[in-house]
Image (cartoon, grey):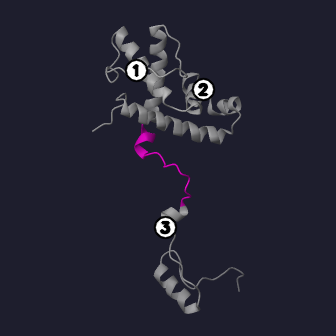
Amino acid sequence: MSAALQWPIDWETNTAQAAAWQVAQGKCVTRPATQAEITPATGQSSPAASLAFYRKHTESLLKRYLYASMQVGRAPSILSDPVARGWASSRPVRTFEDAVIFVLDIESCLSKLGSLDRELLSRVVLQEYTQAETAILLGMSPRTVSNRFALALDRLTERFLKANLLVLPH
């Protein structure tokens, strides 16, 4: 005889029969766990799946911001004070004035983020450090940097969507 356990019922396919067998054996029958019980409450809602789709678009907007701010003759101050928002941000940049408005709009969105979010976005996207190098520079674990960078991109994406810098497809 084998030393392995022998199950009287195939548990994966016949859960109703398994519950009946447990009742017959005098064992307690428990209900399946709900999603709220499985997922720990962290106080933060997970980002919408649509925001994860826009992460690359948000990164490309930040790179465009770096280029436009250099053209305007202004260093990209990701840690700047809040600036008033312009109206022409959703249009392609064609003139010097459009470039200035675009830079001010991006800086306005960036100024609404927390300092750690701005630091992560600055290091990874604008300065092109890897996430591992950023972790060393900030004294964090690479996994923490990876998770917080994704959340920072999602927060910035939300700001861009509210400011009409990114447009959802219909």
Real-space CA distance between mark 3 and mark 1, rounded to the nearest whole angstrom: 46 Å
Image quarter for residue 130? Answer: top right
Q: Which residue is mark 3?
A: 34
Q: Which residue is depicted at the point 55% across and 56% down?
A: 41
x then y, percent, for residue 43: 53, 51
What secondary structure is found at the residue carrying circle 2? Answer: helix
Mark 2 neighbour class, 10 Å CA radius: few under 14, some 14 to 19, many 20 or more:
some
The secondary element bearing badge 1 is classed as: loop
Which secondary structure is most common in the magenta stretch?
loop
Identify which amino acid the numbered label 2 is placed on: Arg
- Is residue 53 part of the magenta span, yes or no? yes
Answer with mark 3 or mark 1, whichever residue precedes in sequence: 3
Q: Are marks 3 and 1 in contact (CB under 8 Å)?
A: no
Which residue position is annotated with label 2? 123
Q: Splitting the image into 4 quarters, where does residue 115 fall?
A: top right
Residue 144, percent from left and from top? 63, 41
